[in-house]
Image: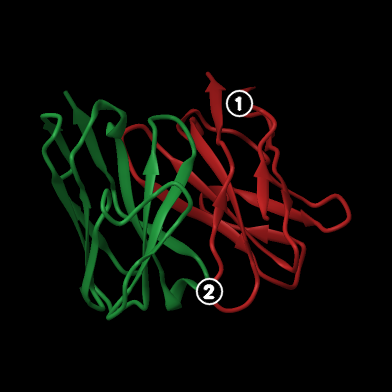
Amino acid sequence: AQSVAQPEDQVNVAEGNPLTVKCTYSVSGNPYLFWYVQYPNRGLQFLLKYITGDNLVKGSYGFEAEFNKSQTSFHLKKPSALVSDSALYFCAVRESGGYQKVTFGTGTKLQVIP
Amino acid sequence: SAVISQKPSRDICQRGTSLTIQCQVDSQVTMMFWYRQQPGQSLTLIATANQGSEATYESGFVIDKFPISRPNLTFSTLTVSNMSPEDSSIYLCSVELQQVNYGYTFGSGTRLTVV
């Protein structure tokens, strides 16, 4: 069975500092990996995905994520945090090929402190 | 990119009643997914709905409690039947869009409170 772990319930970072939100995964085959963001009282918004190719993936709002196969990780990063980045972030995984169920992590609340 | 309209956005319902949530996509999609999310928590897949066939339910979810319709390639409904306070949650529909290349797009959700 596939799974996603987000070890931190909450991450606090000062505005202007780099941020990292951690994610590790487990799947039987090759993974497709995703990051989503959820602002209060709103649906999930797609940030970025890794399907194949370059291990460093760039997404919306200046976010990027690095796929590390040996460590089975897909950490979300941003060089300089904004207060408006404060939200709930979800990592998700599915197996490659055809239709496969997506499994979401438990979410990490990011708090950017002015 | 495609837009998903989900309604109602929120509702307060009496226990024992049923609520039907609608999800409309502005492009044709093969599969539509229904999730449940407790506020501030992760998403749990309820079922996958293919047009023209019965929905596939995940462990812990049954058709009698969560009947799903998928009459065409742009529309689906999820009914929460015989509601109890434990059904209070956010319900989200989602689709995988070709143009997003394996990315999934979500509706804005239905916040259900059962009293």
Residue drawn at x 35%, y 45% as measured from the top left? A43
Position of residue B80 measured from the top left corner of the image (x, y, whole percent): 22, 46
Residue drawn at x 35%, y 53% as measured from the top left? B62
Q: Indicate left or right for A35 with B35 as reference.
A: right
Q: Indicate left or right for B21 with B63 as reference.
A: left
Quadrant position of residue A97: bottom right
**Chain A drawn in what color?**
red
Camera-side residue of A5 and A77:
A5
User: For the residues carrying marks 2 and 1, which lies nearer the camera in this image?
Assistant: 2
Labels 2 and 1 touching (C-beta < 8 A): no
Residue B38 lies, with reference to residue B80, above or below; the image says above
- Outermost residue toward the right in this view: A70
If you read the primary sequence from the N terminus, does the residue marked by circle 2 or circle 1 appear first? 1
Position of residue A25 measured from the top left corner of the image (x, y, whole percent): 72, 50
| Residue that numbered label 2 is attached to | A99
Q: Which chain is green?
A: B
Q: Which secondary structure, mark 2?
A: loop
| Residue that numbered label 1 is attached to | A9
Camera-side residue of A86 and B98:
B98
How far is the residue under mark 2 from the one under mark 1?
30 Å
What type is the residue that disc 1 sits on?
Answer: Asp
Q: Which secondary structure, mark 1?
A: loop
Position of residue A88 measured from the top left corner of the image (x, y, whole percent): 49, 34
Quadrant position of residue A105: top right
What type is the residue that disc 2 sits on?
Answer: Tyr
| Circle count | 2
- Outermost residue toward the top in this view: A114
